[in-house]
Image: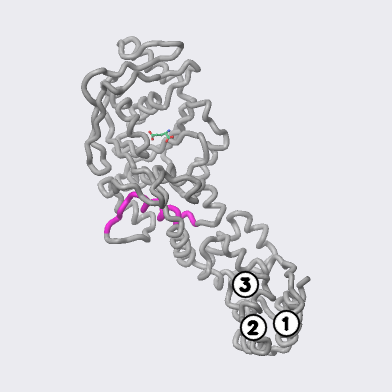
Amino acid sequence: MVRVRFAPSPTGIPHIGNTRSALFNYLFAKHNNGKFILRIEDTDRARFVPESEPAIYDILNWLELKWDEKYVQSERLEIYKKFADQLIEEGTAYKEDGAVKFKMPELGKTDWTDAVGNKKIEFKNEFQEDFVLIKSDGYPTYNFANVIDDHLMEITHVIRGDEFISSTPKHIQLYKAFGWDIPVFAHLPVIVGSDHQKLSKRHGAKSVLDYKKDGYLKEALINFMVLLGWNPGEDREILNISEMIKLFDLKDINTASPVFDNKKLEWMNGIYIRQLPVDELKSRLSHDFGGQAKLKNIDDVLLEKIVSLAQTRMTTLNDFYLLSGFIFENPKIALNSKEKEIAKELLQNLSSVSKWKQEEILKSTKEILFKNKIKMSAIYKIITGRETGLPLPQILEIIGKEKTVKLLENYK
Ligand code: GLU
């Protein structure tokens, strides 16, 4: 049975790079009816960040990447010690300054065929140094605990970022020293920014929780991440999770570094927002990032109409508040004296519209527009405080005459 793991170190809030590893492992497990294991690699106490571990759970839960088993390395210290003792006894490890070190072979080479690109990778042993298994604080190193656990947890495929390629010869020599089977390794090419440098905050990359906060949909983020290094063929870009599971194969992982393109993520998010049934979009707006508080006094039918109009113009969920905030936040809009005049004229015209329908509203605003030789955007600003947004006659019809009049009186 296929068993894979996502093994984050709680040293920060996971970003797109770590989370892509989780996704690829998850898809590979599901495609093969295997198991997806979460293992918290928290043995580096100096780099431990307390809020990191809950963030890992939050992210996996939000993205619905459900793990089948979970382990935490700091709860398994006895196990690592036992295996270190075994190596000392067998003569492949020794103690030095309170730490246990592994004796790397001095001759020959260590190699493996990586499942990404099916390419052989090899390292000369003469350039490899002995390395620490258990530190003087009693905690195992990443290299040691990682191998012990991959063996004990019967991991068949190790799918991880390619920054771990240089650690792999150490891991392979440990498997050999124990006489254990070596898993398949698949090292995912590092994600880069448009300047082809390793992705960082500088490129607009942020923690996955920030994407959530900024109004990205989990479906869009997953779809965006899966294309960072995997190619489903057929020139397809928009895939749902079941299609990904069905198609996912390690042989389709590109060997070239994927380029992170924030514009593409925005485009994709817009597509996913438009695909949501209005009801679902409304419910996400109310439940995600404080929407509940902002929307609690709005009539449900009215909200649904606003959501449905805004849906085609949103790139992120947050855009909803930019587009329609003027309806429920009652902002005081700063107008100059000319604008105040126009506001009065608008008020007069719109108050006398008898049939409150967008055609009538349009006709009535157009009169003001021609008379004052101004553009629709100027009128939009007088009413909403913003230059652009929702189509004016439609949104005014939706919010009603009374609310429109209130907005026109609400300037400073
Ligand atoms: N704990 C390592 C990390 O932080 C995991 C590397 C691996 O998957 O082997 O990414």
Q: Is 7 or 161 nearer to us in this picture? A: 161
Cβ of mark 2 under 8 Å from ligand 1: the answer is no
Q: Which residue is identified by label 1?
A: 342
At 22% from the left and 41% from the top, the residue drawn is 118
The residue singled out by tag 2 in the image is 374
CB contact under 8 Å: marks 2 and 1: yes
Marks 2/1: CA–CA distance? 10 Å
Count neighbours of disc 3 (C-alpha within 10 A) and say few if under 14, some if 14 to 19, many if 20 or more: few
Determine whether 289 is above or below 277 in the image: above
The C terminus lies in quadrant:
bottom right
Q: Which secondary structure lies at badge 1? A: helix
Q: Is residue 383 magenta?
A: no
Q: Is residue 226 magenta?
A: yes
Q: Is residue 220 left or right of residue 341?
A: left
What percent of the width, then of the height, locates residue 219? Answer: 45, 56
Q: Position of residue 304 (x, y in %)?
A: 59, 70
Q: Secondary structure at mark 2?
A: loop
Amino acid at circle 2: Ile
Mark sitting earlier along the chain (2/1):
1
Residue 68 is situated, as x and y percent measured from the top left of the image, at 41, 39
- Lower sequence index among marks 2 and 3: 2
Q: Is residue 60 visible?
A: no
Q: Nearer the viewer, residue 362 or 342?
A: 342
Check disc 2: other Cα within 10 Å, few if <14, some if 14-19, many if 20+: few
User: How far apart are the two marked residues, 2 and 3, measured between alpha carbons?
Assistant: 13 Å
Q: Amino acid at mark 1?
A: Ile
Which mark lies nearer to you, 2 or 1? 2
Image coords of residue 4 (percent x, y): 35, 38
Magenta region, residue range: 217-233
